[in-house]
Amino acid sequence: MNSEKILIIGACGQIGVELTLALRQLYSNNQVIASDLRPEVHPLLEGTGSYYTIDATDIKAVAELVQKEKVTQIYLLAALLSATGEKMPMKAWDINMNSLLQILELGVEQKLSKIYWPSSIAVFGTTTPKNDTPQKTIVEPSTVYGISKYAGELWAQYYHRRWGLDVRSLRYPGLISWKSTPGGGTTDYAVEIYYEALKNKQYTSFLSENTYLPMMYMDDAIRGTIELMEAPGEQIKSRMAYNLSAMSFSPKEIAAVIQKHIPNFKIDYAPDFRQAIADSWPSSIDDTGARMDWHWQHRFDLDKMTEDMLRNLSK
Ligand code: NAD
Ligand code: SER
């Protein structure tokens, strides 16, 4: 652990901020370098470690940084998410796919010890079984984001088989957090709703009331990511991404739980283009593989998450 040097690319995003801080706790500030296309954001700004502004698709710049900082592991989080991706399909493909392929190549050249690259429930499509979606099933994604994630999983598996590169991946559900805001996904409503409940006591959901999606609190997602990355290699039986699950709820259900804390909170519904994306995804996920192989267990359900979100956002 002491000789590792970790580079996080996309560190200013919803996951990146919390993952950077968690890895700096686990390793040390000096061992975890944050980077992103945009300038450093709060709370990374509080001098917890080094920061570089870098484009994930500029492989020359990434390679120079890897050599200069003697990087041994990369967490590649830079991406365009599902909703933004549908507005700019070619740009989404370029960022999501080319950054991964170039970093996989760099991983072989530089003999990196590990690479982390997240996938998503967006790999699944309308032909996939909708409830308790298994790890291995019909996979026909309908968004450019989902296509890039599924192609990326296959490339990760290929680099592991062909070159022995230790690439690990999770199919995150929609992630809910208070330390950093989400960046253009279809599940973002489940974060916005807490901000609006506290501020305006009213929220208009862009998904319809009975749209069930797999969701997870960020604390669980960060812990799951680190547990996957720290697990002994022989426990990682899937070199495609692991299904990862915690809870499933609809806009109507999350609103009802918020109303237990804020009784005059009101929700209405105005579904937009994101409804079709959500309708193509599973309602719930079977993550038996992660639970068996490296002992994944979630800790937050909808009630516990809501208490924590409202308490922290009220501050
Ligand atoms: P985000 O949009 O919040 O953050 C992505 C970050 O990448 C941003 O800070 C952005 O500035 C940066 N970025 C974009 N293009 C870049 C480039 N060319 N070079 C360097 N940085 C660039 O996304 P997130 O929610 O933190 O997601 C991180 C990863 O996790 C993505 O791969 C995403 O697909 C995956 N994921 C997220 C969720 C979720 O609910 N948040 C769910 C499933 C999978
Ligand atoms: N939360 C992500 C999105 O909605 C799922 O990958 O795009």
Image (spheres, rainbow, N blue to C red):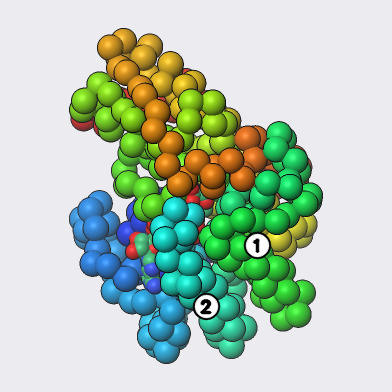
Secondary structure beneath disc 2? helix
Distance in Å between CA atoms under marks 1 and 2? 14 Å
Please tell me in which quadrant of the rendered image residue 236 appears: bottom right
- Asked whether the viewer can see residue 75, the reply is yes
Residue 88 falls left or right of residue 49: right
Secondary structure beneath disc 1? helix
Q: Name the residue carrying label 2.
A: 98
* Disc with the residue nearer the chain's start (1 vs 2): 2
Q: Position of residue 30 (x, y in %)?
A: 35, 67
Q: Name the residue carrying label 1.
A: 150
In percent of the image, x 28 and y 24: which residue is there? 202
- Asked whether the viewer can see residue 235, the reply is no
Q: Position of residue 222 (x, y in %)?
A: 48, 47
Is the shortest distance between ligand 1 and the CB of mark 2 under 8 Å? no
Is the shortest distance between ligand 2 and the CB of mark 1 under 8 Å? no
In percent of the image, x 70 and y 68: which residue is there? 154
